[in-house]
Image (tube, coloured by chain):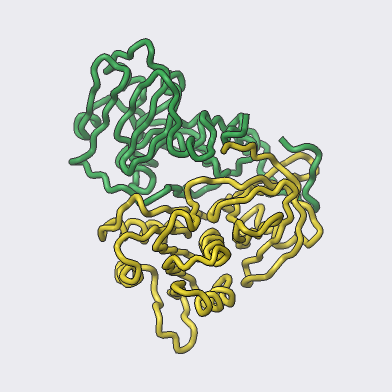
Chain colours: A yellow, B green
Amino acid sequence: MKQSIQWQIAQVKAIKHETPTVKTFTLSIPAWVQHRAGQHYDVRLTAPDGYQAQRSYSIASEPERVGDIDLTVERLGDGEVSPYLHDVLVPGDQIELRGPLGGYFVWDTTLGGPLLLIAGGSGIVPLMAMVRHRVAQRSDIPTRLLHSVRTPEAVIYAEELSRLSKQQTRLDVTYTFTRQAPANWRGYARRVDEMILREVLQTLGNKPRIYICGPTALVEVAANTLAGIGVDAESIRTERFGPTGGR
Amino acid sequence: MSGQFVSRGFQGGRPSAETRDRLPPGQHAVSDFPVLSAGPTPQVTHENWQLTIEGLVQEPITWRWEDFLKLPSQEFTVNIHCVTSWSKFDTRWRGVSMDTLFEHVTLDPRARYATAHCHGGYTTNLPIDELINGQAFVAYEYDGKPLPAEHGGLARLVVPHLYFWKSAKWLRGLRFMESNQRGFWESLGYHNHGDPWKEERYSSDY
């Protein structure tokens, strides 16, 4: 079980613009180890004088993809690592990292469902790895993704999720727009609250596995509200990001 | 530690020399106080709060909230280091030193390790040697105010010389044992000891 997680040098294969502030970096990993959906890598930058900075980034790609991974990273204006990744890194560059890491906020099809995924902003990333894993496994575990985003432009993986929710059976994607909804939007347009949570729960029966990732405020409200309306606290797993690039 | 690798074009955020001296390897300083928890925030009330010391002690002891507040407390200001790579300097707390709690029990000489048990089911393990001599506290105030629930209120362990996952939130008990039993994160790939200055993040970091 236990394997040594060593630093290694990966190569940037491709960079994709997801939204104006979010990019996906496809990295080839020399000592690739299969991850579990929900895990992360630690990325470490080293300056010529030896100064180092490191941060954790969730894996977006499914474990079934061999040899490389996708890290989807939001650029934080006051950050130290994400602006480097966004502004400096180009395909062909090398980057030091280690992983996969983290053993609790993980899901795979053997754990079963139904599955409720709740994302705030770029908190979608580890949950997307779970969705992609479910697709790769041709699973039809009832799955509902509730994604809270500020504006339509800020939706990460919009096209892929739209396609998957049409193609896949029992995969449902629900958005709520907290700042500005698309024109003629008839869905949710507010922060996640008890009514939204009750409605998404309704379609999943009473014992879903729940994964919540996003800013602290969203995670606190979603997790504590669900626990408050009778969902077993043990079935709720959370991952929070503060402004991790803050300094 | 890395070899000769340099990230092309990386200069870094250039923390001041003073900040760099205070930062363990791989850490960066933050001014906010991020929240990290594995599940919902347990709702602990003054009425149902209690703290128990048990295991290898002559007689277990339990404090209720009002009794715990009567114990001598102290203010302390410490730097805290989270394994997710943020550090926060000069955090100000009030709480009861573990030394004070130890005065109320007689340890069995075989006792060497403690497991902290928490509301919500979280656990973490620490050597008793690292809980004594002013190294650890049960804190109930942060920055002059009652400790907020999302930061572990009503009361949490604060063991600033170890990564902050060892500073268990929503503390409800300490069990003393002869053997070192891995806690929640320690069973999930994180280091059994967790010294930030030795960068003991993951179980494979020796």
Query: Can residue B42 be seen by looking at this rendering?
Result: yes
Work out which residue is located at the far top of the displayed protein and give it: B109
Work out which residue is located at the far bottom of the displayed protein and give it: A184
Nearer to the camera, B198 or B60: B60
Tally of marks: 0
Q: Residue B181 location in percent, x, y?
A: 43, 27
Nearer to the camera, A15 or A69: A69
Q: Residue B198 location in percent, x, y?
A: 61, 29
**Residue A74 lies in quadrant:** bottom right
Q: Is residue A97 above or below residue A123?
A: above
Which quadrant holds the N terminus of chain A? top right
Q: Is residue A82 left or right of residue A193?
A: right
Nearer to the camera, B47 or B96: B47
Nearer to the camera, B36 or B143: B36
Query: Can residue B145 be seen by looking at this rendering?
Result: no
Q: Residue A178 location in percent, x, y?
A: 44, 73
Q: What residue do we see at 29% from left, 13% from top? A: B106
Q: Is residue A152 above or below residue B153?
A: below
Q: Residue B81 location in percent, x, y?
A: 53, 38
Q: What residue do we see at 67% from left, 70% from top? A: A17
Q: Is residue A88 left or right of residue A133?
A: right
Q: What residue do we see at 39% from left, 50% from top? A: B39
Q: What residue do we see at 42% from left, 22% from top? A: B113
